Amino acid sequence: LAKTTQPISMDSYEGQEVNITCSHNNIATNDYITWYQQFPSQGPRFIIQGYKTKVTNEVASLFIPADRKSSTLSLPRVSLSDTAVYYCLVGDPGGYQKVTFGTGTKLQVIP
Amino acid sequence: DTEVTQTPKHLVMGMTNKKSLKCEQHMGHRAMYWYKQKAKKPPELMFVYSYEKLSINESVPSRFSPECPNSSLLNLHLHALQPEDSALYLCASSQEGNPGTDTQYFGPGTRLTVL
C-alpha cells in the first residue's frame, strides 16, 4: 500500500500557475496516480489520472518523473474558484485493494 | 446524468437510534462505495460493492451495515453508533469496482452527528 505525502497548505495569487506535489516513495509497478479536488461540504471531484510522464486535460496537467516516486499536479492560471483541498491517490488496477487518499493540500487562491 | 445523490443531507441521532443513509446513481455504474470523512481529514474507504456484491469491507464495526438493493442504490444502516462516528459520510460510484484506478463520482455527503 503506497503511502502518500502532500504539503498541508499552499497560497497562490489569481492568474498564477500552481504546482502541488505528492510524494509516494513506495509506489508499486502497477499503481496509477489520481488527483481529486474537494470543496467544503462537497464530495471529491476527479481531476486527472496518470501512470507515467505527462498527462494533460482541459483543467490540469500531471507530471510524473521516471522513478514515479512523486507526482505534480499543475493548475494553470488559478482563479478564486480553485480554492479547495486537493488529494492524490495511488492505486492498483489489478485488484480490489485498499486505497488511501493522501493527506490533502489546502490551496488558497488570493485575489 | 453524472450525479450521485445522497439523503438526508444532515442527520442527528442518539446512540440508541437506528437510521439509514441512502445513495442513488443513474450512470449505469456497477460499483458503489461508502466513505467516512472526519473534519480536515481525507476520506476513508469503508465499503465497496461491485456488481451488487460486497467486495471490500475495510474492517468497519458492525454497527455500520451496508446494503445494495440494486446497482443504482446503496444504503448504509446505522445502529448503536458512538459520538466518534460523527462525520461526513460520502457515497461514490464508478464504472467497475476498483477504487484505486476507477474515476469515482462522489455525492455531496450526509453530515451525521451522533449525540
Image: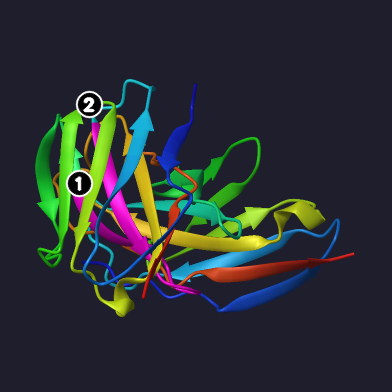
Whether residue A104 sits left or right of residue A10 in the image: it is left
Residue A61 in magenta?
A: no
Q: Residue furthest right?
A: A111
**Position of A63 compared to B4: left or right?**
right
Residue range of the region highlighted in magenta in the rendering: B31-47
Q: Is residue B19 left or right of residue B2?
A: left
Residue B8 on image: x %, y %: 43, 46
Q: Which residue is mark 2?
A: B71
Pinpoint residue A84: horizontal percent, then vertical percent: 64, 61
Query: Picture quarter containing residue B26?
Result: top left
Q: Chain of mark 2?
A: B
Q: Magenta stretch: dominant SS?
A: strand
Residue B48, numbered circle: 1
Quadrant containing the C terminus of chain B in the rendered view: bottom left
Q: Nearer the viewer, residue B13 or B53?
A: B13
Q: Is residue A29 visible?
A: no
Q: CA distance from mark 1 to mark 2?
A: 12 Å
Provide the chain ID for the residue under circle 1: B
